[in-house]
């Protein structure tokens, strides 16, 4: 059986929704609400972490790297992985 695209799934859901019983509609609604709350919580957690990092930077306690240091670190990592093969 071929996997349906999201577009096809949406079509099927929209077509079925009118004939679905109330209990199923309530379950779908609950799933959507939980999904929405989870997305909001993830966004809040991300924003708190970003603010923590900004605060650390502004207080001078964050470890920062120059572009050159990042490039050198990436090169060293790449060379190490190449040697392992």
Image (cartoon, grey):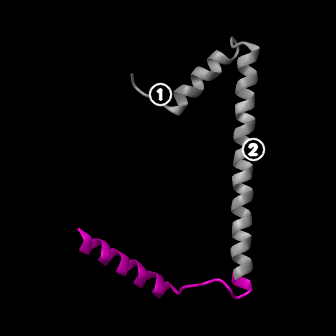
Residue 62 at what x, y percent from top left? 65, 83
Comparing 7 with 64, the one in front is 64
How many numbered marks have been drawn onto this rendered protein structure? 2
| Residue for point 24% across, 75% down | 83
Which of marks 1 and 2 precedes in the sequence?
1
| Residue for point 73% across, 21% down | 25
- The quadrant of the picture occupied by the C terminus is bottom left
Rendered position, 28 above or below 43: above
Q: Badge 1 is on which residue? A: 4
Membership of 76 in magenta stretch: yes
* Secondary structure of the residue carrying numbered label 2: helix
**Mark 1, residues whose alpha carbon is within 10 Å: few (<14), some, or many (≥20)?**
few
**Mark 2, residues whose alpha carbon is within 10 Å: few (<14), some, or many (≥20)?**
few
Q: Badge 2 is on which residue? A: 37
| Residue for point 39% across, 22% down | 1
| Residue for point 43% across, 28% down | 3
The residue segment tinted magenta is 57-85
Q: Which of the 4 image quarters holds residue 71?
A: bottom left
Comparing 4 with 21, the one in front is 21
Q: Are marks 2 and 1 in contact (CB under 8 Å)?
A: no
Residue 14 at what x, y percent from top left? 64, 22
C-alpha separation, residue under disc 2 versus residue under disc 1: 27 Å
* Secondary structure of the residue carrying numbered label 1: loop
Residue 12 at what x, y percent from top left? 58, 20
Comparing 57 with 17, the one in front is 57
């Amino acid at each position: 059986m071929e996997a349906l695209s999201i577009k096809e799934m949406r079509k099927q859901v929209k077509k079925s929704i009118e004939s679905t019983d109330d209990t199923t509609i309530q379950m779908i609604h609950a799933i959507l609400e939980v999904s929405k709350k989870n997305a909001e919580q993830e966004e809040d957690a991300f924003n708190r972490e970003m603010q923590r990092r900004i605060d650390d930077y502004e207080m001078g306690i964050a470890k920062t790297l120059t572009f050159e240091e990042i490039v050198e670190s990436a090169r060293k990592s790449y060379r190490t992985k190449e040697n392992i093969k």
